[in-house]
Amino acid sequence: MASSDKNDKNEILLESGTNEIEIMEFTIAGNLYGINVAKVNEIILSVHVKSMPHTHPAVEGIIKPRDTVITVVNLPRYLGHDGEPGEKDLFIITNFNRMTIAFRVHTVIGISRISWTDIQKPDKAISGSGESVATGIAQCNNQLVTILDFERIVAEIAPETSVRVEEIDQLGERARRDCPVLIAEDSALLSKLIREALLRAGYTNLHMFSNGLDLWEYVTKLKKADKLDGNVSLIITDIEMPQMDGHRLTKLVKSDMQLKHIPVVIFSSLITEEMRVKGRELGADEQLSKPEIGNLVAVIDELLGDKKS
C-alpha cells in the first residue's frame, strides 16, 4: 500500500451520532493494531529520516514531505520491538491535538467500520495501573485489534503537548464552585489531568466516567428519579470512547426534552472544521481541541454563569 489519503474516506463519512468508528488496521512485528481513521491524513512509503539530538528514544527524527517538517515516531521501537527501519515500512501521517506526526509501521491492512459497542477496554490484569497504551480491543474481520492510545504515546514522548495543569494558575485567584460537572474521558492519564485542572480551577463537584455509556446511564437514572436539578449542571465529553462515543452521547442528550437544556462541551483531540460541523449538527454548546485546558475552564465559566449548584 504505497500511498493513500483521506479523499476516498471523505466520500464515506460516518453519519453523526451513530456510535460507529472506522479503524485503520496496521501491523508491527506481526501484531495487529488500529488507529481511528479520523486521525489519519495519509499513508506514505517510508523515506530517509533526519535524526535529531536530545530526543525521546522513540523519536526517530524528522522528514519534510511537501515542505512541511514532520516528527517521526518509531512505533515498533516505542512498543518494545526492533526499531530498525525496513525498506517496506510505511509512515502513517496523523493529525490530532493540532499536531502532525508520522508513525512508522510495518504494513497497513485496511479499514474496518465497527460500532463503539464492539470495543472493550483492556483488562486491568493487562493494563496494570489502568494507564495502558491500548485504549481498546476491537474485533475486526474475526481478528482482535489493539487500538492504541496515540494521545498517551505523544504525551509520554512530549509532555508539553498534553494538558498542562499549570495553565490554570495563570487564571489567578478563583472562587470554589460546587456545580456538578460530568466528564466522560476514557484515557486514564487525561482523565487524571482534566480532573486535577478543574479542581485547581475551583470546580469541586466532579463526576468522572470512562465512557459515554456510563455517563448516559447515570444521567438516565437521575432523570427517571426526577433528580436532575442540582445533580447535573454541565457535561464534558471526549469523542473517542469505547461503548459510546461523545457524538452519540451528545445526540442522546440534546434530543431528549428533559435533558437538552444541559450544556454539552466536546473536548477532543479530533476537533477539525469537519468535526465542528458534526458537533453543531448534534447540538453541542461548545467544541474545544485538547489540550486547551485554560480555554475549557473559560468556556465552563461562561456556560454556567452565576450558577452555584
Image (cartoon, rainbow, N blue to C red):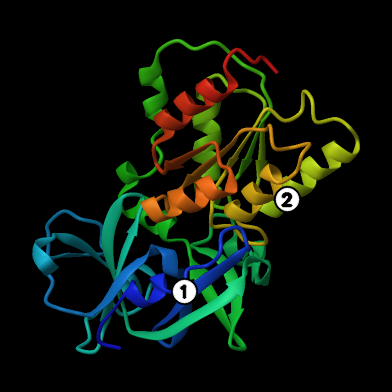
| Distance between the alpha carbons at the discs numbered 1 and 2 | 29 Å
Q: Amino acid at mark 2?
A: Asp
Residue neighbourhood size for the residue with mark 1, other residues' Cα within 10 Å, grouped as few (<14), some (14–19), many (≥20): few
Q: Quadrant of residue 70?
A: bottom left
Q: Is residue 291 above or below residue 202?
A: below
Residue sitting at the far right:
225
Q: Which mark is residue 124?
A: none
Q: Quadrant of the N terminus?
A: bottom left
Q: Which residue is mark 1?
A: 12
Q: Residue at x 55, y 25 (%)?
A: 303
Whichever of labels 1 and 2 marks the residue nearer the N terminus, that label is 1
Q: Is residue 220 above or below residue 196?
A: below
Tally the numbered discs. 2
Q: Quadrant of residue 49?
A: bottom left
Camera sees residue 210: no
Element type at mark 2: helix
| Residue 2 locus on image (x, y percent) | 25, 87
Q: Which residue is mark 2?
A: 214
